[in-house]
Amino acid sequence: MLYDALKDLLHFLKDSPTAWHATLEIGNRLAQQDYTPLDETEKWSLKPGEPYFVERGGSICAFILPKEKPKRATILASHTDSPALKLKPRPVFIEDGLPFLRVETYGSPILSTWMNRDLVIAGRLLLSEKDRVDQQLVFLDHAPVMIPSLAIHLDREINENPKKIDKQHHLCPLLGIQGNNREPEKIFEELTGVRQKALLGADLYLVPNETPALIGIHHDLISSYRLDNLVSAHASLLALLGAEKHPKETIQMAIFWNHEEIGSGTDEGASSPFFIDILKRIALSYKMEEEDFFRMKQGSYFISIDMAHAFHPGYKKKYDKENAPEIGKGVVIKYNANHRYATSGLTAAHIVQLCQKINIPTQPFASESNLHCGSTVGAITATRTGIPTVDIGLAQFSMHAARELTSTTDHLDLCKLLKSILEN
């Protein structure tokens, strides 16, 4: 059973190279379990006791309604996007007879890790279909590309004193060697298989052309692109699908956000009203008064799940040793005095108490005091909704690299914890 969950994670990672692919995969799995899809532009007729899901771009929210009027909601939140290199609107250019792609950074990837490895273009194409705009998801593995670096013979200090990577000129993937006398538009048509006149728009990214894997002597490490944050999304999805249904007067919910890596400030990001609008429409379906809605909100619990930096013995000065989580040592609870993470002593206490009950280890994370920490959708949600929130996650190595590492046992613990949260 445990191995099945890890095997399923590898499939989930492989099938989710971009946020849109992840949303499609999540939606398909929900539909297979009889969740009813909803359209935000249509009137909702929600029935107590039934499961539903709604998509907005690369974000998706799934929930199970209680049979009685809800007094609270338990919400698991993760995100579907990861740092990447995104193709520009006119990506193909010819330089000294060679065809390249022009890209820009999405979020904050470790740029050096994207060089000298096979990459695939993946994402969505927006196509003209009569009077409609159709979305087509693509994974163009028929034409892998690579960003070649400069040879060490031309930069002898590359290991001791690496030069700053010029994002405009040094991150251009090479498409081949036949560029002379060819129009960039024709090259792009050949690459995508779509005529230029039919292509209305695109959101395309470079993703590593490598299969997720279990590695290490005992296969106790997970190696893949997009562990941050598909590991959390996968655990949340399994928890929702596997939890005991219909706890009394509680909405069980999992939301998977897009655009977390770029600050969440979009129409489908955590700063948008997507989540609170869904909560309000649920309240309307139960004919709840506004007073009841406010009470329900304050009785709710929001769990933001995202990855954390594992203690790396080779870089000890970058950590506060007493508050640095170790890989394979349990679920991480994130703290920050300035509330870059939403955790308070009280919201953490609920997690610690439950973990003690179900025998799951926990460990704290707080940054070295001279370094700034990141943030999550937790702080955004707590600010916008006032719902008590905790930030948790798993420890990982190589965050924001093209290939990341985390622990198999930690992932299984997270799956168990999130399921228990929804049931309790």
Image (cartoon, grey):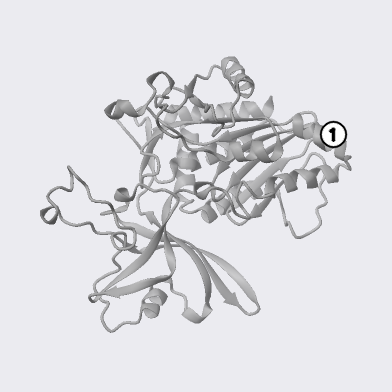
Quadrant for the C terminus, please.
Answer: top right
Image side of residue 32 versus residue 231, left or right: right
| Nearer-the-camera pick, 30 or 174 | 174
At 31% from the left and 48% from the top, the residue drawn is 113
Q: Is residue 81 above or below residue 346?
A: below
Residue 305 horizontal/vertical position (percent)? 55, 35
Image side of residue 365 versus residue 275, left or right: left
Give the crowd class for mark 1: few <14, some 14-19, many >=20 residues within 10 Å.
some
Q: Is residue 319 above or below residue 290?
A: above
- Residue 213 in view in this figure: no
Number of numbered discs: 1
At 36% from the left and 44% from the top, the residue drawn is 401
| Nearer-the-camera pick, 239 or 350 | 350
Say which residue label 1 marks.
68
Task: Farthest residue to the bottom: give it.
Answer: 181
- Residue 301 in view in this figure: yes
Q: Amino acid at mark 1?
A: Glu
Image side of residue 16 versus residue 208, left or right: right
Image side of residue 335 versus residue 419, left or right: left
Residue 146 horizontal/vertical position (percent)? 29, 60
